[in-house]
Image (cartoon, coloured by chain):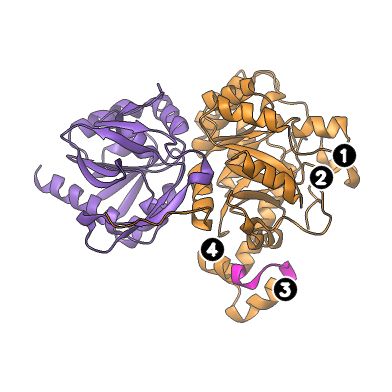
Chain colours: A orange, B purple
Amino acid sequence: MPEVKKETGTFAVKKGLAEMLKGGVIMDVVNPEQAKIAEKAGAVAVMALERVPSDIRAQGGVARMSDPEMISEIQQAVSIPVMAKARIGHIVEARVLEALEIDFIDESEVLTPADDMHHILKSEFKVPFVCGARNLGEALRRVGEGAAMIRTKGEAGTGDVVEAVRHIRQVNRDIQRVVSASPAELMAIAKELGAPYELVLQVKELGRLPVVNFAAGGIATPADAALMMVLGCDGVFVGSGIFKSDNPAKRAKAIVEAVAHYKDAALIAEVSKGLGEAMRGQSVALMEDKEKIAGRGW
Amino acid sequence: MKIGILALQGAVREHRDLLHRLGVATVDVQSRQDLYEISGLILPGGESTTVGKLLVRYGLLKPIAEAGRAGLPIFGTCTGLILLSRHISNSSQFRLGLMDTYVERNAFGRQLASFEADMPIPVLGSKPYHTIFIRAPYIKQAEKNVTELLTHEGKIFFAQQGNLLAAAFHPELTSDTRVHEYFLRIVATAQTSQ
């Protein structure tokens, strides 16, 4: 066989991993035991972090990248992909996660931002990134920086799905607008959205985001997870919602099934039975703006 | 002729779009009933532990295995290759176990080792095929009844056993339709011989 030239860390390979996660559930875990429960329940990946968002919210202080030792232990515990969070703009935390051979980095507003103007230039990394967004402009700025996957932000750690719904509705509305606009209008729309023009053209052609989009932030029940799929998300992240509930293993499995069969209401009814109490949560409508974290990201 | 695509989790859309570009009708397979009307089945890439569990939970593992043994052409990519294999290293995960192959999961390591490369696949013609490997498995060994269609450095990346076809890479992530056309020829042959 002639010489074969292998290229690693390309955008196709990064985006490809996100494509393989579609229709799946990614679960926040804080130790190897939880990671194994998540894998056993059918999670497509786990997010390794020291504190789930609801604890970060309750305890306050500066939230940073997790202890590399804890991340390595979780990598050893499961065969599914392992993700971890770096602070917005924290290039070195991201390089550390890359050195740990993490499968995906979440440049996340759930942690305290390290840079209040710039995100990481993700195209310079070999490891893929996922980033949060509340609208099409924000999503395309992140893709422009090299993100291989987007998640709508929601409001993490609340157990209230309203912001997750608001953000995917907004992204869908923005995409509809781009799709129905005439080509002559697209530069003005790109300017208004604050989005790279070339990526707006791609959205126009595809009729959707150029990368996979998961929902996040406030998903607590199988019905919440299925709702996000109905609204057009490719999959869901569940943070505090599983391991802050009465029966994590059963709830995790139920959410996996609800996402795989989101159109089947009878099945969702069946898997939702006897799950015990969901995380108690807090209503986003009663929160002060300064308590919200979705506004982080530029 | 309709081709089923197992639609429990993973890169379903990419296979569907590619087949539609070839003018082939598809069915998303989510339950046993969906198997009745199809002439061939694609098992897309995804997370093999997740897909294996969902196959069992929805009573699809046995019907698909039986259909495969009865001659239904099945094409598995990445996760699909793992599910088709009888032997999986260090794993007791659910599988169809139809091909006499020994598979290594995540065989190249973590995501950083994922790669793309042009590979010669003689059965698809003289032009190399652009392969994309993502946390990919490979076949490390196969029984004599398995035909190796692409082997590189002793690793089998593309193989056929009767009407069963398995690729460690992702033809659905490229715009090159030759691998799918090869599978459609297996389907067409299976239909005329019935």
Q: Which picture quadrant has residue B144?
A: top left
SS of the residue at dot 1? helix
Q: What amino acid is at disc 4?
A: Gly
Cα separation, mark 2 vs mark 3, equals 25 Å
Q: Which of disc 4 and disc 3 is earlier in sequence?
A: 3
Tell me the tag on residue A94. Answer: none
Say if residue A253 shows up in the picture.
no
Q: Where residue A25 sits in the image (x, y, percent)?
A: 57, 36
Q: What amino acid is at disc 1?
A: Leu
Q: Which of disc 1 and disc 4 is earlier in sequence?
A: 4
Tell me the tag on residue A191. Answer: 3
Q: Which residue is mark 4?
A: A207
Tell me the tag on residue A286. Answer: 1
Residue that appears at 53% across and 53% down:
A9
**Vertical placement of A216 versus B174: above or below?**
above
Quick check: do tags 4 and 1 share a chain? Answer: yes
Q: Which residue is mark 2?
A: A293
Cα separation, mark 3 vs mark 4, equals 19 Å
Q: Is residue B69 magenta?
A: no
Number of other residues with Cα within 10 Å of mark 4, as a class: few under 14, some 14 to 19, many 20 or more? some
Q: Nearer the viewer, mark 2 or mark 4?
A: 2
Number of other residues with Cα within 10 Å of mark 3, as a class: few under 14, some 14 to 19, many 20 or more? few
Q: What amino acid is at disc 2?
A: Ile
